[in-house]
Image (tube, grey):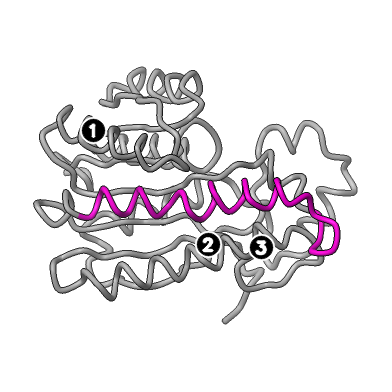
């Protein structure tokens, strides 16, 4: 029996990267996956990949930074499959992150957009999902980053939002654990996406690997494996934790 048989999992932010990898892995474990993303075409492509493998998923367009949009999406997800068992909250605006310089000269519009999507966006997902999870579910897995505790000379707005996600996971775990909800955050290290692999100079890739204790670069599928564990029964005793998936970059 696969780990998530008959489970309904909502993935918020599933068009590309770790969110798409998690959606595919969850579906492979027999979850019925509801994929939400502002990038509707990307979410549909992920659904097509899942269905090509013989698994079940649907894609819905939504804006995680818009409470009303999330408020419409969660009931739609519940109505599609009759309930909700787990949530993977993975939203992030990587375009804004790439323009996140340092605290002295960051464009405040970039700061506000980063906070709106990468941090505040996780709150309406939590707000609307928690009542449904109390009814029949048990787990939320957030995507954070090792940037939440390593320190970085750049990208302060991103680091602040990642640290806030860790705090949000601990809040949800503390507030609703007695009602059966577990909440954790997965904190990946740098992930070698196809775009980075194709476009980055070889010396950049070598420098990325040199900062890691592992023998290879991180992949989106690494984080997906941890997410799958956390929302399955295998993660039943893991609650309120921030779990690094980084090949040993951070030791704590």
Q: Secondary structure at mark 3?
A: loop
Q: Quadrant of the C terminus?
A: bottom right
The image position of residue 159, as x and y in percent, is 65, 63
Quarter where residue 171 is shown: bottom left
Q: Which mark is residue 122?
A: none
Q: Secondary structure at mark 1?
A: helix
Whether 119 is among the magenta residues is: yes
Whether 234 is among the magenta residues is: no
Q: Which residue is mark 2?
A: 187
Mark 2–mark 3 Cα distance, whole angstroms, equals 16 Å
Q: Which mark is residue 214?
A: 3
- Mark 3 vs mark 1: which is more N-terminal? 1
Q: Is residue 189 above or below residue 83?
A: below
User: Where are the magenta residues, as a range?
Assistant: 101-130
Q: Is residue 11 above or below residue 45?
A: below
Which of discs 1 and 2 lies nearer the camera? The answer is 1
Mark 1–mark 2 Cα distance, whole angstroms, equals 26 Å
Are discs 1 and 2 less than 8 Å apart at CB?
A: no
Question: Residue drawn at (10%, 51%), measured in percent from left and top?
Answer: 136
Q: Main secondary structure of the magenta part?
A: helix
- Mark 2 vs mark 3: which is more N-terminal? 2
Which of discs 2 and 3 lies nearer the camera? The answer is 2
Q: Quadrant of the N terminus?
A: top left
Task: Name the outermost residue toward the bottom.
Answer: 252
Q: Which residue is mark 1?
A: 77
Q: Secondary structure at mark 2?
A: strand
The image position of residue 43, as x and y in percent, is 44, 25
């Amino acid at each position: 029996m696969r780990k998530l048989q008959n489970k309904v999992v909502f993935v918020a932010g599933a068009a590309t990267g770790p969110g798409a990898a998690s959606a595919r892995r969850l579906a492979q474990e027999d979850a019925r996956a509801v994929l939400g993303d502002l990038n509707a075409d990307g979410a549909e492509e992920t659904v097509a990949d899942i269905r090509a493998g013989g698994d079940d998923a649907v894609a819905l367009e939504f804006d995680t930074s818009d409470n009303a949009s999330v408020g419409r999406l969660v009931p739609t997800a519940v109505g599609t499959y009759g309930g909700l068992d787990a949530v993977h909250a993975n939203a992030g605006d990587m375009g804004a992150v790439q323009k996140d310089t340092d605290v002295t000269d960051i464009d405040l519009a970039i700061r506000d957009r980063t906070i709106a999507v990468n941090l505040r966006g996780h709150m309406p997902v939590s707000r609307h999902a928690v009542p449904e999870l109390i009814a029949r579910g048990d787990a939320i897995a957030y995507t954070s980053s090792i940037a939440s505790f390593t320190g970085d000379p750049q990208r302060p707005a991103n680091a602040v939002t990642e640290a806030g996600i860790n705090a949000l996971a601990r809040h949800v775990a503390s507030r609703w654990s007695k009602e059966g909800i577990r909440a954790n955050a997965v904190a990946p290290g740098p992930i070698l996406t196809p775009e980075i692999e194709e476009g980055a100079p070889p010396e950049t890739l070598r420098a990325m690997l040199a900062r890691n204790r592992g023998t290879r670069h991180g992949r989106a599928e690494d984080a997906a494996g941890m997410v799958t564990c956390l929302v399955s029964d295998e993660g039943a005793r893991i609650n309120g934790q921030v779990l690094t998936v980084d090949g040993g970059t951070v030791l704590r």
